[in-house]
Image (tube, coloured by chain):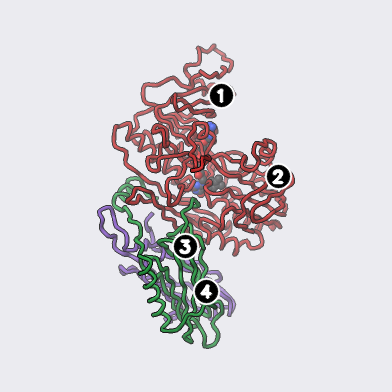
Amino acid sequence: MAAKSSKPRIWISNRTPNSGAVVTVKAMVTHPMETGLRKNAHSEVIPQNIVETFECTLAGETLLSWQLHPAISQNPYLEFKFVARKSVDLTMRWVADDGLRIETTETITVT
Amino acid sequence: MMNLSRRDTLRLGGVAIAALTIAPARARAETEALIKEFAGGKTPKNAGLTLDIPLAAENANAVPVTIRLDDRFSGARSCEEFLLVAERNPIPEACRFKFSPAMGMADVTTRIRLAESQTVVALARMSDGEILVRRVSVTVTVGGCNG
Amino acid sequence: MLNRRTFIAAGAATVAAAPAIAAPVAVTSTTMLKPKGKKPRIVIAGGGWGGLSAARHLHAQGADAEVVVLERNPIFWSLPMSNKWLIDVLNTDYLLHDMIGPSRKYGYELVQTEVTGIERDKKIVRTSQGQIDYDFLIVAGGIRNGYDAWFGNDEKAIEFTRRAYPSGYTADAEHVAIKNKIHNFKGGTMVMTLPPPPHRCPPSPYERACVMAWYFKKNKIPAKIVILDPKPRIMPIGGGFKAAFDELYPDIIQHIPNAKVKEVDPFNKKIVTTAAEVKFDDAILMPPHQAADMVWRADLIGKTADGKPTTWAEIHPTMLHAKEDPNVYLVGDVMGAVSKQFGYYPKSAHVANYIGKIVAIYIAQRLKGQEVKTLLPDNLCYMMVSGEPKEAISVQFDYEIMPDGTISQKQIDIDIRSADLVEEDHKWAQRMYGDFLA
Ligand SMILES: Cc1cc2nc3c(=O)[nH]c(=O)nc-3n(C[C@H](O)[C@H](O)[C@H](O)COP(=O)(O)OP(=O)(O)OC[C@H]3O[C@@H](n4cnc5c(N)ncnc54)[C@H](O)[C@@H]3O)c2cc1C
């Protein structure tokens, strides 16, 4: 079942948190995370193809960055928590070693 | 879902070779070097950090791992970076996380591949230079609980 | 009764010349269900997901043979999607399917009968309507509920449990009983015992807990659902189910891991497990699953190293026939372990359908004198965790042949619940029904 779409799956515990509340974000993209360590039937190495970085930014400032290596499972999954302080647009961006970019923006409104 | 003919070609074209594992001595050396570089000469403290990972992993292709700084960030003290190492994987460095102080806390979960049973190490570098560490030894089981 | 008789008689031409108005003919040990035909005959014992999928694809794959399906049920009841039907997210039409139409369309014969024995040395299947011989046999009887693990041969306790606390894991009226149970529950503790692995559709008991919890929450029923799970943690899609339990139903669902059943007292509503002892007001008691009776009767059950029955059929991992009998194939949940790495294929409808297709191809290749080329299935499963908004999680499995010839499995859990997975689930179901029931 190879990747069909690179549409990220995002789940946010609370999009309208109170100031100081903890918000959980779960994010997943479809990607093979080919390690570069496997060979095919003709003994040729299957080239590495992985998502190398994930970044979550707000207003241009990086909140969280994640550097991935081949140990990360297929369809890389990330869950992170942060303390909500102000209303923001969270931009999440995945970049793969072949130049593939996946990007999505989610709005959090602090009440 | 794949249709059968596609599956057939896949099978022929994509015979997988088991992930190569590396010799224990080299693995240890590589892990030690990684930790040394990350710690910048400091001695890691075995406190303040939680590494949550199953002691027995049924699906070695996707082992859930949580790394959590026990305390929230306060004032000038925050967590700058996490490093996750699986010392007997072909590439021991699994991933890194960098946090801005604006996060207010450091608590992340992902899923990793483990080539075999081994010790998984999580390290945290604090803004004041302190290094925290947690090690958990994980057994990769070969079970029938394949969901 | 007359109708059924007539239908059967039509397929049982050797019954002695019948008088104009025939009294039912007694079935004896020599009564033939069908005489030997001209073409090779493929008999399929059990017309559920696996059996009907194989039947549908045999001729399409070019098998020049007579195909006869032996199935006890008169109508097809889909177990997949049935949890959603329990809480009226789907209606009955979604699950009930005609079997006669497809049998005519795809050119196989469907006989409603009970398989009572399989004699592999004589290559015959015994049924309640007489015996039938085969060239190839596909055994696809699904599972049996292994109540004996709890009650030994205490038939009274078994019957009481079956009626009072049905499991709802086979295609029968137990599902209606469970639906009524949920709709009439006034509150209190509802206990679910989960079967130990391997069992039919591993994520589905958690799905059932979620949909029940959603229903109780919506209708403000003061209910608590206690899941007694023999496994050390929720799996598969453990993260997704745990999030649903904790975030959506924190006051309703209690999941107890490492709870292996030690004692069940259905009369006093009490269960003792290795993790906890619980009293219940009502329950869905799922005993261990085993291969269907017909597999035991055919003497196809594997043995463990210490000589005990594995309770599943011993099969060739890639050729899919019985270890000791290349003319007998095993399709669906009856299949035993196929790999040292992961053990069993998931016991799912998706896999049963896929393996049904693969076995149809294998048999067709053999009938045509061609070389049989290994094919592997995959698996895909969607589980609803919330009824409103409708949200689901999912798991997929991929298989590969390793250089040493063994099969390796890759599992991907999609733990993030979302509405689009509910849509994908419907598409999955329609694709499946469309494959062999349309
Ligand atoms: C609540 C629930 C939810 C599920 N959800 C999913 C899902 O979302 N996706 C998925 O892929 N799978 C799902 N499954 C699993 C799926 O239903 C089974 O894995 C699948 O039915 C297995 O196919 P089978 O052919 O082996 O068995 P079955 O489909 O059970 O077929 C066996 C047939 O044999 C017949 N039979 C047995 N003994 C005899 C006899 N002696 N004589 C005559 N006939 C006999 C039975 O009547 C039955 O029709 C679910 C199961 C349950 C219970």
Could you tell me how far apart the alpha carbons at marks 4 and 2 are, in whole angstroms? Answer: 44 Å
Quarter of the image for the N terminus of chain C: give it. top right
If you read the primary sequence from the N terminus, does the residue marked by circle 1 or circle 2 appear first?
A: 1
Q: Going 41% across and 37% down the picture, which residue do you hit?
A: C323
Q: Is residue C115 above or below residue C218?
A: above
- Which of the chains is red? C
Q: Chain of mark 4?
A: B
Q: Chain of mark 3?
A: B
Could you tell me how far apart the alpha carbons at marks 3 and 1 are, in whole angstroms? Answer: 57 Å
Q: Chain of mark 1?
A: C
For badge 2, the amino acid type reads Pro
Q: Of helix, strand and loop, which one carries label 2?
A: loop
Q: Which residue is mark 3?
A: B63
- Image location of residue C220, percent across then percent down: 69, 58
> Chain A hue?
purple
Q: Which residue is mark 4?
A: B68
Say whether mark 1 and mark 3 are on the same chain. no
Q: Going 54% across and 78% down the picture, which residue do you hit?
A: B48
Q: Which mark is residue C266?
A: 2
Say whether mark 2 and mark 1 are on the same chain. yes
Could you tell me how far apart the alpha carbons at marks 1 and 4 are, in whole angstroms? Answer: 68 Å
For badge 1, the amino acid type reads Asn
Q: In this rendering, which labeled residue sits more in front, label 1 or label 2? A: 2
Side of B111 where B22 appears, left or right: left
- Image location of residue C372, percent across then percent down: 32, 38
Side of C368 where C337 appears, left or right: right
For badge 3, the amino acid type reads Val
B147 or C351, which is in the foreground? Answer: B147
Q: Which mark is residue C3?
A: 1
